[in-house]
Image (tube, rainbow, N blue to C red):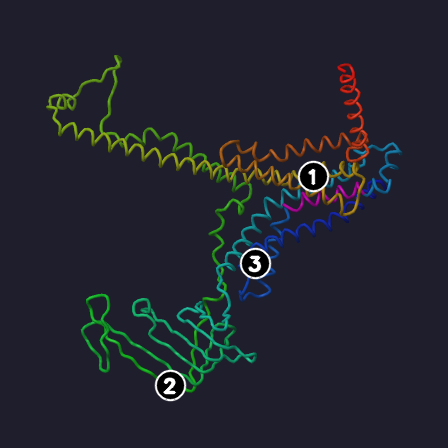
Amino acid sequence: MKKLDKLILKSFWGPFVITMSVVVFVFLMRIMIFYIDDFVSKDLGITDYAQLFFFFSLITVPTALPLAMLLSSLMAFGNLGEFFELTAIKSAGISVVRAMAPLFIVAVLISLFSFYFNDRISPWANLKGYSLLYDIKTTKATLKIKEGIFYNDLPGYSIKVDEKEENGKLKKMVIYKHNNRSYEFGNTEVILADSGRMYSINENRYLVIELYNGTRYTDEVSSGNSRPAYTTLAIGPGSMPRYSNFSRNSFKHYRLTESLASFGMKRTDEGQFKYHEFMKNISDLTSTADSLRNSYDETKKNLVSGSQQYYSYNFREGTDKTIKKGPWIDSLLARPVSDSLKKEILQNTRSAANSVLGYAKSQTEYLQTKLKDANKYELEKHHKYTQALSCLIMFLIGAPLGAIIKKGGFGVPVLVSIIFFILLYVLSNQGDKWVKEGLLIVPVGAWIANTFLFLTGLYFIDRARSDSRLFEKDVYIMLGKRIKSAWTSRFGKARLIES
């Protein structure tokens, strides 16, 4: 390896590692902020959050690699141009394309790594990350009671506390305890206490509620003909009478113990998420897309034969294009036509037409769904290739742009990189949208962004080879002066002749 190649690689790897870390962190924070409401008040350990951050960091790598490649290559050649090292390289007879050769090899290797990552690691990370995220989202919030507000997330209870002290003591507690028949008879047990406290035991598996100096009211309601002693009659909405056995008990100390199993996070079967296209590799995507297209073709082939079940009669045409008469036609022709017969024929015709129309609509929706699903899986398969190749394309844009702009650091390179990354993002999403709407075939919609940016990269390489001053403002100032001078000389003479 020559010293020139070492110099260029050394100027590349530093910005690449930094920008890759920053980009992954930014994308990770964007995802975390998007789901922040699902993480609040969840009693989760550090291990759960560490796993979630790790999986989503892996998920962001395929998206971060092209941007890191663009920014780092632009900064590398921008720094070389800013400190006149690129000028010295050119003066030594070495072209810009030759100077880009070591980074081109690196870009190819990163593209191959991105392809392997997309095909093998990304589906696994998506499956693990989104299944864990689903479990976190479905986990109930921890038991946090606010003053003066009823807390209803504990199954079977509604709890209100008027005042909470710093030592954990609760003042003026009201507890409504519901049973399985509360929806029918209302709250059948109410507990009032002057004070109390709440804490968990057995590694947060059970909640203990200790109450002091209070009263427990119970109202045991029964329905039927039997009437217990010391009851009052309650007339309900139905015909069956209901009898209420009301009791009141005072206590100095009362203890309740309830399970907190519903608040813990439960892991769901990851197989429930494997159907999604993000969880599949290229071979699985190809198999699923082919299966859906075969089902689409088979259904389309059987449309005519399947619709025949909705017809009452089958006609056979002869060589003279006339209907051959049979016994059923003879009996039909011999039958006298009456208003009732006409009405019956019209009703049967209308019923058959509605049946055929319903069959046609259902089959159309089924075929559209099959085709849409097949396109979705095939589109994701193409994205495995496009995301990997975009790393190389971003290098073809960033390296010549850095040689043209001749600015290093995180100023102009960051701005230019963001512009081209947004362009890649917009074109990719627009191509996907056109494919899903049926306006483009899958390969065209999937590769439209890379094709446009590849041609842009070739243009910038050509400009860099000819030492173009594409981004220098003096060039545009001089161009504006030439246009103004030409305008004045042409139209100024015309006005002079007219006058």
Q: Which residues are magenta?
A: 63-78
Residue most extreme to the front: 499
Depth order, front residue of 291/356: 356
Quadrant in the picture for the C terminus: top right
* Number of marks in picture: 3
Q: Earlier in the sequence, mark 2 or mark 3?
A: 3
Q: Earlier in the sequence, mark 1 or mark 2?
A: 2
Residue, disc 1? 394
Other residues around mark 1 within 10 Å, as few (<14) / some (14–19) / many (≥20): many
Q: Residue at x 78, y 47 (%)?
A: 409
Magenta-drawn stretch, dominant element (helix, strand or loop): helix
Identify the image quadrant of residue 11. top right
Give the vertical position of 263 relative to 307 (above or below): below
Depth order, front residue of 35/59: 35
Depth order, front residue of 232/94: 232
Q: In this image, 188 relative to 430: left or right?
A: left
Q: Residue at x 48, y 64 (%)?
A: 140
